[in-house]
Image: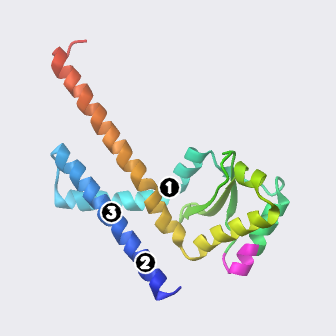
Amino acid sequence: MSWKLRFSMAGTVALIVAVSTLGFSMIMSFMGVFNLYTLAAVVVIFNIAQWLFAPYIINRLYGVRPFEAGESPELHRMIGELSERSGIRTPRLMFSKIPIPNAFAYGSPLTGNHVAVTQGLLSSLEAEEVEAVIGHELGHIKHRDVQVMMFISLLPSLFYMIARSTMFSRYSSRDRRDTGGAR
């Protein structure tokens, strides 16, 4: 891996950690529990947990399931040959019924690497094109882009959920104040 790619990946990770730290500090300050040590612990724990458990979340969000060998021997042959040529272990082939043409690589030390393809991709591309897409996804795994992409893909969702829960808790506390706690 070239020094430029390593530098870019390190910079991306640093930026993600900085943005998540800023986000958590703003939320904690707003909630009145800001403490530098607590902030550091929350950010570190969150980023590690996110990296480890993101594949489970992705599987749930996109309805991804294993693509068994009997279902599509041609796809399994493709991913096996391309992995061997790339010099990486063959990732687990996954499938999603989403009608949008897409493929993505993901994984963690807990789950190993995965390459997922959607129904839309398989029904709209020729075999050579699918092979090119899978090769592209394997490139992400080989160059360890998967770890960087995991951080990037889940941060916005987390901030949305925190903002949403904070907003609803403020509304419900205002409702209790307005009614004197009686319902």
Quadrant housing residue 155: bottom left
Q: Earlier in the sequence, mark 1 or mark 2?
A: 2
Q: Is residue 83 magenta?
A: yes
Distance Cα–Cα, label 1 vs label 3? 15 Å
Q: Residue at x 53, y 85 (%)?
A: 1
Q: Position of residue 135 (x, y in %)?
A: 69, 71
Residue topped by disc 2: 8
Q: Residue at x 54, y 61 (%)?
A: 110
Q: Which residue type does callout 1 highlight?
A: Ala
Callout 2 secondary element:
helix
Q: Which residue type does callout 3 highlight?
A: Val
Callout 3 secondary element:
helix
Residue topped by disc 3: 44
Residue topped by disc 1: 54
Q: Earlier in the sequence, mark 3 or mark 2?
A: 2
Distance Cα–Cα, label 3 vs label 2? 21 Å
Q: Which of these two is toward me, 166 or 44?
A: 166
The correct choice, above or below, for 82 with respect to 93 in the image is below
Q: Nearer the viewer, mark 1 or mark 2?
A: 2
Q: Which residue type does callout 2 highlight?
A: Ser
Q: Which residues are magenta?
A: 82-88
Q: Earlier in the sequence, mark 1 or mark 3?
A: 3
